[in-house]
Amino acid sequence: MSKLLPALDLDALRSFVAGIESGSFSRAASRLARSTSAVSAQLKKLEMQCDTALVVKQGRHLQLTGQGEILLSYARRMLALNDETLRAIKGELLTGEVRIGLQEDFGESLMPGILGQFKRHYPELRIVARVDRNQALHAALDNQLLDMALIWQSDTQPQSGKSLGDCPLAWIHHPDFDISPLLEKGEPLPLVMFDSPCLMRSRATACLDRAGIPWRVVFVSQSLSGIWAAVQAGLGITVRTQIGMPASLRKLSPLLPAPGSVGISLKLCPTEGTSHTAQLKLAQLIEEALLTELER
């Protein structure tokens, strides 16, 4: 008869996964409503059960060991199956859909990981994502075409939704594009922008006007991918956050006045048929992922 292996503690696995996904076990403790010492004790328990180290500290960050990386993959599946089983038994295997709106900035950088986690919690629930400009997302919320949206906080509108913090704005350019000769000669800076109305376009032009620096918009795009393509081609510079910025581009050295920061809000507008539980879970995942991104 083969020897029975010990059963891994699911609560300890949940703390382990939360610690890795949030970047620290202190943040995981807050997320799980436990003390940091309790979460650390669960990690030690897991390492004893697995008879190996699972994480190592590198500066302020956690780094998975090879065995820890293996465990993380299995732990996610085990927790997903556990949660799905309990929801099925309790009749909570939700169906239907949640409609979320967001800008392109978040589409590729944050949402894949968020939606993957959400799908593991609610495998039968359909997610409908709308990627659009800020003004269009506000209109969709007002017309109940969306259940929630991640939006930029406008300078001219009152606070809308829950504030998730401020994201620094930056002048962004291709490393080969040098604006120094233009500034020295007083020639207009070429700008790559969305068409008006656009919060970041207004912020950029107002910033240059206050500094007495001439400018001209040389390229207008309806999509963020078009903005990035034009800047990579060396047509001009733009103002955006660094969320989702292509690796080939860089923040401009401090030759220009700082464009400040932009607030990010998450607005929930539950509509008939929307699962409130699922909506709150998706909101939680978005908030955690965004806060982690802003701390980098």
Image (tube, helix red, strand yellow):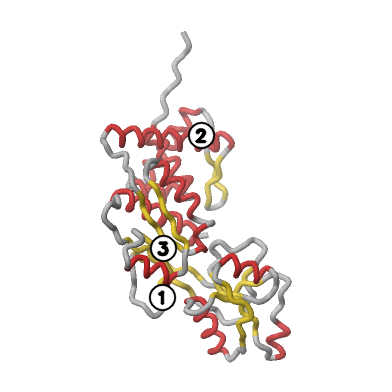
Measure the alpha-carbon separation of dots 2 and 3.
Answer: 33 Å
Residue topped by disc 3 = 150
Which structural element holds mark 1?
loop
Q: Which percent across, then down, holds residue 282? A: 38, 52
Residue 287, relative to residue 92: is it above or below? Answer: below
Seen in the picture, residue 143 relative to 28 is either above or below; the reply is: below
Q: Which mark is residue 71?
A: 2
Please tell me how crowded label 3 is: few (under 14), some (14-19), or many (20+) other residues with Cα within 10 Å: many
* Numbered disc in front, either 2 or 3: 3
Q: Residue at x 56, y 66 (%)?
A: 242
- Please give left or right for residue 89 compared with residue 100 in the image: left
Kind of residue at badge 2: Leu
Q: Is residue 186 left or right of residue 118?
A: right
Residue type at the position of mark 3: Leu
What x and y, as percent, mark residue 166? 44, 69
Where residue 251 appears, as percent x and y from the top left, is 62, 70
Which residue is the site of mark 1?
Answer: 154
